[in-house]
Image (cartoon, rainbow, N blue to C red):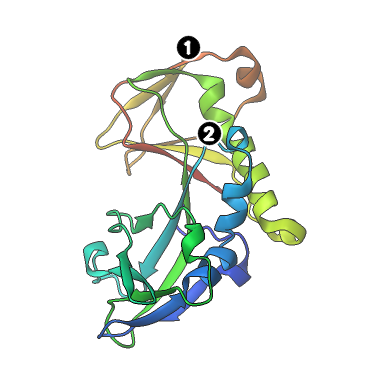
Amino acid sequence: MKKLALLPLLLLSLAAHAEEREWAPYKKLVEDMRLDKFYAIPANERDKINLFLTIRPHNKAIKPEDLVLTVVQGGERHPLPTLSPDYRLALVPNPKWLTDDAKIYTSLPKGEKSAAGYDITTPLPAGNQWNYTPIMSSVEQSNHAIKKMAGALSLFAPTIKVVVFKFGKPAQLKVGSTVYNTDAKHQIRLKPESAWLKENPVMLASERPLEAELDTE
């Protein structure tokens, strides 16, 4: 999921600066991106999904390690975790920073812009073999979570449709007696099948996927 935003209104495009300067109020980022609403959902209603905030510079030449975000509150500085190679950040709201004086500072050069969005994955059990329903029911769970996050604007929220199994090389994924092969990107995209959700067949991968991402198409 490369450009998932709950709503167009939530896609942040913020100017960054060469010298470390204010990027966004921490509370505003959390609330605008609905992170507070996501973590308010009972844990058993989001246990099949991992939500990542993505901060992607418009300039493709800027690497994740070049983008340093720091929460500044009073005289204290709290660096946020380094972005993953996919520009992801697992940002769990910190109640201590949900105040008007906590600001996020950025290290990006002046004039560079970045967009905030989401990536969602579903956790895979250890090994290469799992049951179908716990994995593929993540699609339905993620849509329920997205609607709760969007609230009154849920009609405009995106709809998750597929689980994308990403591999580091050509691979196969077997569901029952059906075999799926990776595409040119070493990915297998599966939509939940209602019959299999009931039967809960075994899924067997020829090698362990790098991840299972949830996507809209």
* Residue 117 relative to residue 154: left or right: left
**Cα–Cα span, label 2 and label 1:** 25 Å
Residue in view at x 29 percent, y 70 percent: 60
* Residue 8 relative to residue 56: left or right: right
Report the front residue among 209 and 134. 134
The location of residue 206, given as percent across then percent down, is 30, 21
Quarter assignment of residue 212: top left
For label 2, the crowd category at 10 Å Cα-Cα, with few meaning under 14, some 14 to 19 and many 20 or more, is many
The amino acid type, in three-letter code, at marker 1 is: Ser
Q: Which residue is mark 1?
A: 177
For label 1, the crowd category at 10 Å Cα-Cα, with few meaning under 14, some 14 to 19 and many 20 or more, is few
- Residue 204 in view: no
Residue in view at x 69 percent, y 50 percent: 148
Please tell me whether mark 2 sits on a helix, a strand or a loop: loop
Q: Which mark is residue 124?
A: none
Report the front residue among 151 and 217. 151
Report the front residue among 149 and 9. 149
- Residue 121 in view: yes
- Which residue appears farthest toward the front when viewing the image? 75
The location of residue 31, given as percent across then percent down, is 58, 65
Quarter assignment of residue 168: top left
* Residue 186 relative to residue 31: left or right: left
The amino acid type, in three-letter code, at marker 2 is: Lys
Residue in view at x 40 percent, y 24 percent: 125
**2 vs 1, front mark:** 2
The location of residue 45, given as percent across then percent down, is 62, 36
The location of residue 16, given as percent across then percent down, is 35, 81
Please tell me whether mark 1 sits on a helix, a strand or a loop: loop
Report the front residue among 100 and 20. 100
Q: Which residue is mark 2?
A: 48
**Relative height, residue 80 to residue 161 (above, below):** below
